[in-house]
Image (cartoon, grey):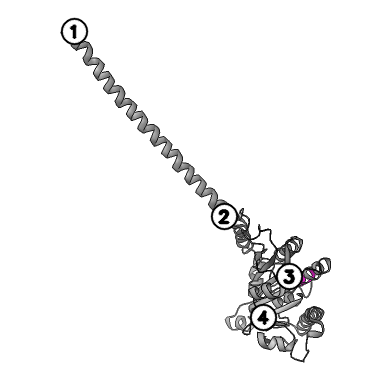
Amino acid sequence: MTSSDDANAKPSWERKTLEALAFSVLKEQRARRRWGVFFKFLLFAYLLILLAAAMDWFPDGEAVKTERHTAVINLQGVIEAEGEITAEKVNAALAAAFKDKNTAGIILRINSPGGSPAQSGEIFDEMRRQKKLRPDIPLYAVVEDVCASGGYYIASGADKIFVNRASLVGSIGVLMNGFGFTGAMDKLGIERRLLTAGENKGFLDPFSPMQEEQKAHVQTLLDELHQQFIAAVREGRGNRLKETPEIFSGLIWSGEKSVEMGLADALGSVKSVARDEIKAETLVDFSVKENLAERLAKRLGANAAAGFGQGFMEKMSGGGVR
């Protein structure tokens, strides 16, 4: 080989080496890009799953079952228009449970100290209405820790009420509470300036003395609501109720005692009632749950409302009838 051939071979070898190095770099960059895209896709999918879970886009795993089942609706907490238990949510759950062709029976799982008479009354009325439309589907209430006041108002609309021995049941009564600060204001030398249009408009103001005629008016209102409560219990329980002077006094009893008094029918749990009464052990949760967006909207709305003086006054005066 001549020197000119050596000169021609040297660039060819270098070129091949450079090309191989370049291809290696390109291959590594492509692999890096592919892995980058892959991990970005994983991150996007993860965020999408979190968003779907927060917005409650996933169907309830039990609710999609097609077999014969017992529908369960959870009533946990205080009954109020913006609380854990609302007529809107419970009535929607009732409608869905009664409508489902595979529902063999419905259980209201109740653990509530009570709350709004209006919300409780709406749920009671919807229970009775749905029962008239579908008398073939039994509707039971199962009490866990407590079923008092508005909670018992709702339970009394069921075909049967089952309790635990240690459950707290009853409190068939109505109350309105608050505080009065007139004595403290006098001692501190604070003058209350309240302007109203309507002589009784400010009668629940905690910084003004309550007049006897206003107190009598509130008592008449509470007695009226109490009679509505009593009528609902009598309608729901019928001749099973063993009435005594104390039964509508607002007292509460143990679950075992409530069975003796006719306030409840028997001891039982959600599982035992589904198994022994409804004969469908598969439980499907029909409770209407708030998603994250609804909870945030409610919290923002509550924070905005707190800026108004009326909201402050309602909180100071006890804020409601129970």
C-alpha distance separating marks 4 and 1: 105 Å
Give how far apart the Cα atoms at labels 3 and 2 are: 29 Å
- Name the amino acid, label 1: Ser
Rendered-image quadrant of the C terminus: bottom right
Prevailing secondary structure class for the magenta stretch in the rendered image? helix
Position above or below: 68 against 206: above
Name the residue that disc number 1 marks: 4
Nearer to us of marks 2 and 4 is 4
Badge 3 or badge 2: first in the primary sequence: 2
Residue for badge 4: 163
Residue 217 in the image, given as x and y percentages of width and height? 79, 81
Q: Does label 4 or label 1 sit earlier along the sequence?
A: 1
The amino acid on which the numbered mark 2 sits, given as a three-letter code, is: Ala
Mark 2 or mark 1: which is in front?
Answer: 1
The stretch in magenta equals 120-125
Identify which amino acid the numbered label 3 is placed on. Answer: Gln
How much space separates mark 2 and mark 4, taking CA atoms?
34 Å
Which of the two labelled residues, at mark 2 and mark 4, occupies the earlier sequence position?
2
Q: Nearer the viewer, residue 30 or 181?
A: 30
Secondary structure type for disc 2: helix
